[in-house]
Amino acid sequence: MTLWINRAHSVGATAQLLDLLGYALLYNSVAVGLARRRREKELEAAAA
């Protein structure tokens, strides 16, 4: 029984790590996109 518990734990840990990595990549992509849009607006305002 212990082997199955350890196996399930390790599989769950891998899934949790992948979920966290995916969330972090998504969050970072949104932040980068927002920062680029904000910077472009600031550059346009400065040029006008």
Image (spheres, rainbow, N blue to C red):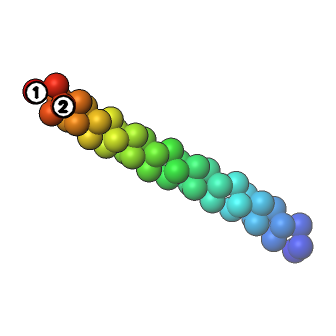
Q: Is residue 37 visible?
A: no
Q: Secondary structure at mark 2?
A: helix
Please name the amino acid that badge 2 sits on. Answer: Ala
Is 2 placed left or right of 45 in the picture?
right
Q: In the displayed image of the protein, which residue is found farthest to the right?
A: 2
Q: Residues within 10 Å of mark 2 (few under 14, many from 20)?
A: few
> Could you say where residue 22 lies in the image, as x and y percent from the top left?
53, 48
In the rendering, at what x and y percent does residue 38 appear? 26, 40
When the figure is inspected, residue 27 is found, relative to residue 1, above or below; the finding is above
The answer to which image quadrant residue 5 occupies is: bottom right
Asked if residue 16 is positioned above or below residue 5 in the image, the reply reads above
**Looking at the image, residue 37 lies above or below residue 15:** above
Q: Residue at x 22, y 36 (%)?
A: 42
Farthest left residue in view? 48
Is 43 displayed left or right of 33 in the figure? left
Find residue 48 and report its image quarter. top left
The percent coordinates of residue 23 (x first, y second) are 50, 52
Horizontal side of residue 17 vs 34, given as left or right: right
Report the front residue among 24 and 41. Answer: 41
Q: Which mark is residue 48?
A: 1
The residue depicted at 37 percent of the width and 45 percent of the height is: 30
Q: Please, what secondary structure does the residue beneath circle 1 have?
A: loop
In front of the other: 20 or 33: 33
| Residue occupying image coordinates x 76% and y 66% | 9
Dot label at residue 46: 2
x, y percent for residue 32: 40, 40
Kindly check if marks 2 and 1 are in contact, taking CB atoms under 8 A apart as contact. yes
